[in-house]
Amino acid sequence: MAYCRKKKIRGVVPSNSSHKAYISGTTIKLLALIIAAFLVSIIPANAARRKTIAVLDFKAISKLVATGPGVSVVGWDEKQTNMLTADFITSLVKTNKFDVLERERVNDVLKEQLFSDSGMVSGASAVRMGKMLGADYLIMGQIELVDIASSARPIPYTNMVQHLTNGEMIVNMRIVDSRSGRIVSADKVDVTDSSKERKHLNALNLLESLKEKTVSQLVNGVLESIFPTKIVKVENNTVFLNRGHGSNFRIGSFLTVFRVGEDMIDPDTGASLGASEFEVAKIRIIDIQPKFSKAQLLGTTNEVKVGYICRVSKEIEKKAPQQVDDSKEINW
């Protein structure tokens, strides 16, 4: 009996308190492993919804702003071009729909790999650059024209003169899918603005206005090419869109609703060829909020559904009344 009691003393049978601590520690470890596995499983799915974009520095054809009589000369140099690129990148980030790569990182890769300094890259170079940067899309821009001209006319029944100043900025933008080298979009943004003053205008003010409107249209071009406007809710004859202030439409604009077909894949290369779009309805914008817009369905149809895409109907857009201030901050 003495021997048996001695074995029990030397055994490793835990006390009640230490046993509970052991079970508690094991449970915590298991829970931690389960939570970690869950997070790992959902992070890739969420990350896949955000596309990564690399913006190459824009290039300018002209070094000076073309000015007419009565307008102070404004220099357009590399600094001005860099500022336009920086404003464009900032506005892209504010959409909260993309992961935009740091500009310095993009420029470092360009220099190290000796890519073209023209601001444009070929399809093959885009694929190589995209792999190095981890970018889904490359965006390139070229400033074609910055023009400011002024004319003067007397104000009737006074000895004063009114100066009318007109400005125009043209920028070409190209979006390339770096996975396939395919050009997703090639747009020309042509922005105009004007000002009426009783004295000679400082062209810098008009120039800033041109830059703001140009950046807004460029960002809208990127959104429409990669993430077209979509219907998020249908309520009787009213549809809700996932675009708000700063969009490429205004109150009274007409949009065409499309149902998107299946993605077509090239059997030789495996690259996506895009998808067919089938027109199903027309809508008219009736309200624009900071984050979303409301539109009225024109005609009767039951085919309009959540997820369908909408594009501005350019052929009748000119007839739409302009009731929204284009200077509002971009906010999606």
Image (cartoon, helix red, strand yellow):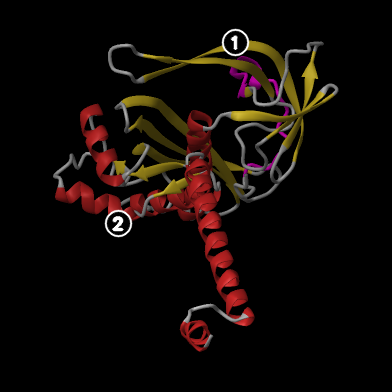
Examine the rendering and report whether any part of residue 86 can be seen: yes
> Is 213 or 312 nearer to us in this picture?
312
Which residue does the image show at 36% across and 55% down from the upper left?
Answer: 102
Q: Which residues are magenta?
A: 310-326
Residue type indicated by callout 1? Phe
Q: Which numbered mark, 2 or 1, is in the foreground of this view? A: 1
Q: Which residue is mark 2?
A: 104
Residue 80 in percent (x, y) is at: 36, 53
Residue type indicated by callout 2? Glu
Residue 248 in percent (x, y) is at: 60, 33
Which residue does the image show at 27% across and 40% down from the upper left?
Answer: 131
Q: Residue furthest right?
A: 236
Sequence order check, earlier mark of 2 and 1: 2
Mark linked to residue 278: 1
Q: For the C terminus, which image quadrant?
A: top right
> Is 19 or 143 nearer to us in this picture?
19
Residue 304 falls in image quadrant: top right
Distance, label 2 to label 1, CA atoms, is 42 Å
Instruction: Indicate left or right for 69 with 155 as reference.
Output: left
Q: Is residue 272 above or below residue 62?
A: above
Residue 32 lies in the magenta stretch:
no
Dot 1 lies on which element? strand
Residue 320 lies in the magenta stretch:
yes
Residue 253 in percent (x, y) is at: 69, 26
Instruction: Indicate left or right for 34 with 76 as reference.
Output: right
Dot 2 lies on which element? helix
